[in-house]
Image (cartoon, rainbow, N blue to C red):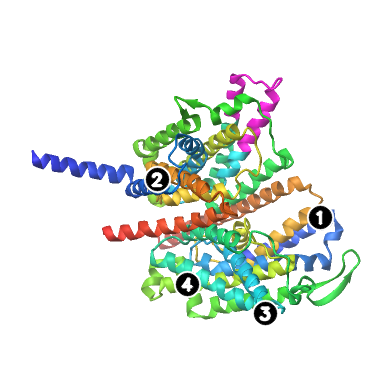
Amino acid sequence: MKIKKVLNKHETMLFLTIWIVSGVIGTFNPAFLSLATVFEILRGSVPYALMGLGILPVLLLGEVDISFVGIAAVSSLVAHTLLRRWGYVGGLGGYVGLAMPIGVVLGVIVSLISGFFKLPVFAVSLGFWLMLYGFNLFFISPEMRFDLPAGLVGFYSNFLFKIRDPVVGETGLHVGVFYVLLCASLIWTLLRYTIYGRGFYITGGNKEVAFRTGYNIISLLCIAMAINGALAAFAGVLQCAYKRFFDPILFRGTELFVIAADVIGGVSITGGRGSVVGVLLGVIFIQVVTRGLIYLGVAPTWQQFTVGVLLTTFFVITGLRGQIRREFIRKLTLCVKRQGKNEES
Amino acid sequence: MRNRSAELKVAIKRYCLEVVGQRSFLLIGLLFVIIVVFGITTPRFLTYSMFNVIMSQCAEIGLMGLGMSLAWMINGVDLTVNDVANLSALIAALTIQQFTHQGQISYSLLFLSYCIALLIGTICGAINGTLIGYLNIPPILATLGGLTLYRGISIAITGGKTLAGLPANVALIGRGTVLQVPIPFVIFVVVFILIFILVKYTIFGFKVQMVGINVKAAHFSGINYRKIIMMIYILSGILSALAGIIVMGRTRSVAYEYGTQVYIVFALLITNLAGVSAGEHSAVAVFMATLILQILSTAFYLRFMTLPGGPFFNNFLWGLFLVTILILAQILKRLRQ
């Protein structure tokens, strides 16, 4: 019974799907099946996993936010500009220490506006999306900034341990993966063992019930958006450190894919359902697919098309599965009812 | 006698509130304020050529905004508006290139290519509608998949290149005028009136409102809600295709990346500005919102053109504007209560 329950879970299905997809790619190009690829995929998914984890509480509340990419861009660029002006030469610590509070403040502003004026977060965050990128480009700098401090220069190859790969040379498990696991376990604990964490699920399931139970919906939204802003800022700093430049339009256009990754991981867009493990798997799934296309030798002009087909197919399959399951449950209950009636008579 | 006039007044008031929408009055006031403010501060603003520009450019975002607002009305969202526009314009452009002889194309063949563009819009809308209505995929995801798919098709067909050098006839629909009024604006007004009638005065429109307010209740009262959802997304696709045709006419070229990012946000901006919500749709408000957006956009451009990085500052103002309007509308609503 327990095995069946585990098998029926969305996360297990997704995990198996990732393995099957990797296997298929591996049969066409054996170079894909190597430890180097695994490390590369993990490293590439670090910023997206952080943003996906950040948006999780907001999605659980049944709200959709797209301003987090703007928050990431603004907080990382502002932190960079300020730190460079102050002559900072250290590593990630100063950046994260400055960017995260900025992210929290911005997130809380969005949540307070939408909470006090009873506006949907989506509409407010749309305004902030425009405003934040405009702010970055106009007030801070419209150019990419390549002037990294000494402490950040080698960050993209800051590995926890190294291996030698015949194709790519030296590679290893990036330290960012450790940060993701840390954040994931923190959020997991918050969602599972704290009263506020349970509140996210309750509010997403039924707002009225949560309100009557005594939850303050606005403060829940504040906490969710604060987490969202903090993790987005962290992701922004990490991404800039990887790419070796600070970008005023960082992550622009990827906001919907982060949300898609969450939903692929089993988070309900209407709220109340979702898990940390699912989010991580969803992000990895998208990374495997997009990187796999390069290994499969798909022409660059056809890559977007292929991603579109895959995304749509995935959504269709999950949609159909839900429908079949509902139908099955309906028939089952009908059967049980009929049996009960027969026994009565 | 006096009693009757009072009754009439109440009836008119109710009619205005129900059909035109409360938000429209706020928007009309706003429009007035904007025109006065920019008319005073910006010297070249209140001229005929300026209004010509505004009228010929507002059709594109207006049509996409209408499509988005229809989807918004049934608790959905159509993120594909821009890419459907580009894809259908692209297919039309390819057809036109096939038919072109020595840089000329007859009007009947041009009309045929426009029909093909509208057909592509219909097909894209039908795909969205099937995913959302019949397979129960959340709209934001289904249209995200659609967006990637349609953009992917556009990139794959053109190889990422811009199709330019279309025959001169094409420009008629984008730059031509009827009685001094730009054709895009005429098209926009006609479509807007049609949608207004469709939503407010037809059985279909009533069903759409029902589905928007409560899908389950609509289902139990015998409305085929899946079909309604399908029709709405098809309608949105056709409107987007029309926008694509107008863009093609205005620029005489087609690119897969035309307006990506910006147009989706603008369509959402119009929808939110017009106060469209589940089951509540006011085409008048959408029209007003489009005008406001376009006038502001042109005025901002005139005002901040000379500033270094002016366009970026516009983006900042857009966001500020949207948030302020949303808050203002909410405060007004509370005061009225």
- Whether discs 1 and 4 lie on one chain: the answer is yes
Q: Mark 3 points at which residue?
A: A93
- Whether discs 4 and 3 lie on one chain: the answer is yes
Dot 3: element = helix
**Image position of B318 (left or right of A149):** left
Q: What residue type is labelled 1?
A: Tyr
Percent of width and height locating residue B181: 45, 29
Q: Which amino acid does label 4 sit on?
A: Cys
Dot 4: element = helix
Percent of width and height locating residue B138: 53, 53
User: Is residue B212 or residue B334 the one in the foreground?
Assistant: B334
Q: Mark 2 points at which residue?
A: B35
Which corner quadrant of the image does residue A228 belong to? bottom right
> Where A224 sits versus A93, above or below?
above
Which residue is at a point 34% across and 36% down the rendered structure image? B201
> Where B44 sits versus A328, above or below?
above
Which corner quadrant of the image does residue A264 belong to? bottom right
Mark 2 to mark 1 CA distance (whole Å): 56 Å
Residue A6 seen from this side: no
Q: Do the residues labelled 4 and 2 touch (CB within 8 Å)?
A: no
Which residue is at a point 70% across and 38% down the rendered structure image? B162
User: Is residue A112 or residue A192 the one in the foreground?
Assistant: A112
- Mark 2 vs mark 1: in front: 2
Q: Residue A295 carries which label?
A: 1
Magenta stretch holds residue A269: no
Mark 4: few/some/many CA within 10 Å (<14, 14-19, 20+): many
Q: Residue A222 carries which label?
A: 4
- By secondary structure, the bulk of the magenta-drawn segment is best described as helix
